[in-house]
Image: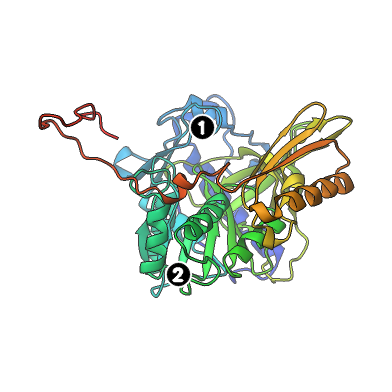
Amino acid sequence: MSRSRPEQGDWSSPAELAQLQRAQLPRVLAQALRSPFYSARYEGREVPRSADDFAEVPLTTKQDLRDQYPFGMLAVPREELATYHESSGTAGEPTASYYTDGDWTDLAERFARKWVGIGPSDTFLVRTPYGLVITGHLAQAAGRLRGATVVPGDARSLATPLSRMVRVLSSLDVTLVWCNPTEIAMLAAAAKAAGLRPERDFPALRGFYTAAEPLTEVRRRRLSEVWGGIPLVEEYGSTETGTIAGQCPEGVLHLWADRAVFEVYDPATGTLSPTGRGQIVVTPLYRDAMPLLRYNLADEVEVSDTACRCGWLLPTVRVLGRAGTAHPVGSASVTQQHLEELVFSLPVEYEVLFWRARAERDAVVLEFEAPDAVRERAAKELGAAIDRELGVPHRITALPLGTLVPASALTAQRDILKARYLFAEGEDWDKAVMYA
């Protein structure tokens, strides 16, 4: 396939952007037919070859990818692969994903499209997993593409506890961090546990790149406030597709429609449209190893072609995801987004970062952490907000700090132990071979 990839500024209208997509679609269709899955799908049938034929292409589902594990979607010789990844998602079944070197250039370029840019003067802490998923590797590739110093902080690793990451942030003068929104809160709490002030004691830090969780605007503001006004730059993507949307300076997510075709699928009617609310469907335009035709990510979104004040000529997207799932409570219903907006509307002085809720048949049961001096007041104010905004019964408990996120999680100095086979008398040899 052609490796000439467009960049912002290569089109001056939505019509020119659509023409860029149409020009690439025949190559995408031809490449897809080199994979066992798509060649079998069209065996004995008319093969789609043109942009006009694309309208008749059926959806590719997550189950299709699971059924084709591991290499049923492969469209190049194995020798051309650069990396292999898996994402089990919520189903627990492996979903394979693979990329060539050329695919990785496309992935890294898209990730690096941040309005808080990344360059050679940056020290970039990657605080997402480096396991089979793509997140850590994607950020590292983008950082190196732009010449930054990358610090592979990983996540969910015994070798990189929160306390160690706080030390790294401070001693290395880290300028940018890639992590999920919850990790931003956890790092702030760990900094406080170390006697540091997130809003003042990290002067080099100038931005968080974040994804993986639906992020309401009120939560974004609160996390920024906790870190002294540092911006949070959101993106959206998956291990199967890489980055597919990025946030503009106005705080709006835009789909990278020059690098993929995006459609909105309505499961009730089976229709696909360029805008509206439904499940997002993605066709990457510059993917060699694993072409995907109309891949249904099944995430709930709202896509609009209304012009944004930033001037980017790209469609906008609101990612609803699980936050869009409503749970019945009494005669009404609530979503995570509803509750999150109310929790983080509490005054910043209340220091509320961690909360949880359960939608029961007769009431919302909600718990959150707060300092002793404000717990009672915060609970009353949150209860009043739920009455006013949602009108559902509720039981609210304000918990002491350290209840939901124990202090040990913020201060522990864990590390990986190397395997040993010979122990002295009196030593614990239960960790021989199988170490942790």
Q: Residue at x 74, y 56 (%)?
A: 346
Q: Quadrant of the C terminus?
A: top left
Residue 358: give x, y in percent of width and height.
71, 33
What kind of residue is marked 2?
A: Thr
* Pick the front one: 306 or 379: 379
Tags 1 and 2 in contact by the CB under 8 Å rule? no
Image quadrant assignment for residue 430:
top left
The label shown at residue 38 is: 1
Identify residue for label 2: 175
Residue 2: give x, y in percent of width and height.
46, 56
Q: Residue at x 68, y 62 (%)?
A: 349
Q: Horizontally, is 77 left or right of 386 in the view?
A: left
What kind of residue is marked 1?
A: Tyr
* Pick the front one: 117 or 406: 406
Mark 1 is surrounded, within 10 Å at the Cα level, by few (under 14), some (14 to 19) or many (20 or more) other residues, namely many
Query: Residue 137: in sight, yes or no?
Result: yes
Give the secondary structure at mark 1: helix
